[in-house]
Amino acid sequence: MVTKLEIVGHDFDVTERIQEYVEKKVAKIERHLSSIEEIHVDLSHLKSARSAADRYVAQMTVRGKGLLLRVEERADDIRKSVDDAADKMDRQIVRFKGKRQTGRGDGKSAAEVAPEIEPMPEIETEEAPVIVRRKKFDIIPMTEEEAIEQMKLLGHDNFFIFYNAKASAVNVLYRRRDDTYGLIEPSVR
């Protein structure tokens, strides 16, 4: 599968040499996982960083079928931050591949297992609140343990929405103040 690579610079000019360097590092990541569809690399220079060692930031986001991984690394040199981010992404992919070796085992796709959801009737109100931003994303069936692991891999601190494969329902996983986790299991009345 052909991987789409996007390199973006924020307060930073991405030269041809840096672009080639990033492409070389990304090629090593692509070898480890064939289901990668898109890799997005954000490079930025923070002039107002507290420490000189944190001025250059490299963020990598890897998307694929059933896959969303993100890393961020800071360093005093752009190449060092790209190296560190690529190494960290490499470790995450190895960890992800190890977690994904076990599946449902019944050979059925998630679409076959998921129950049909009926649309809710619309409720009319006098003044509707203004929605300033909408996000759509694909929900991947996973267990609660996999959801905790994915939450850690993505760097989400507060909550994570996932389709619980065991319960056949959408759940919300959240981190509590005492660093434990809570699970919200919504039901339709």
Image: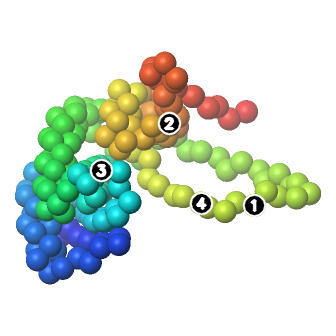
How far apart marks 4 and 1 lie (CA) works out to 11 Å
Location of mark 3 (residue) = 51
Classify 10 Å Cα crowding around label 4: few (below 14), some (14-19), many (20 and above): few
What residue did someone put label 4 on?
134
* Picture quadrant where residue 157 is located: top left
Q: Is residue 144 visible?
A: yes
Asked which secondary structure carries label 2, the reply is loop
In this picture, residue 30 sits left or right of residue 154? left
Which residue is under mark 1?
130
Q: Amino acid at mark 2?
A: Asn
Question: Which numbered marker is on residue 158?
Answer: 2
Q: Tags 4 and 3 in contact by the CB under 8 Å rule?
A: no
Dot 3 lies on which element? loop
* N-terminal label among 3 and 1: 3
Circle 2 Cα neighbour tier, 10 Å, few/some/many (<14 / 14–19 / ≥20): few
User: Which one is earlier in the sequence, the residue at label 2 or at label 3?
Assistant: 3
Say left or right for 13 vs 188.
left
Q: Residue at x 16, y 74 (%)?
A: 19
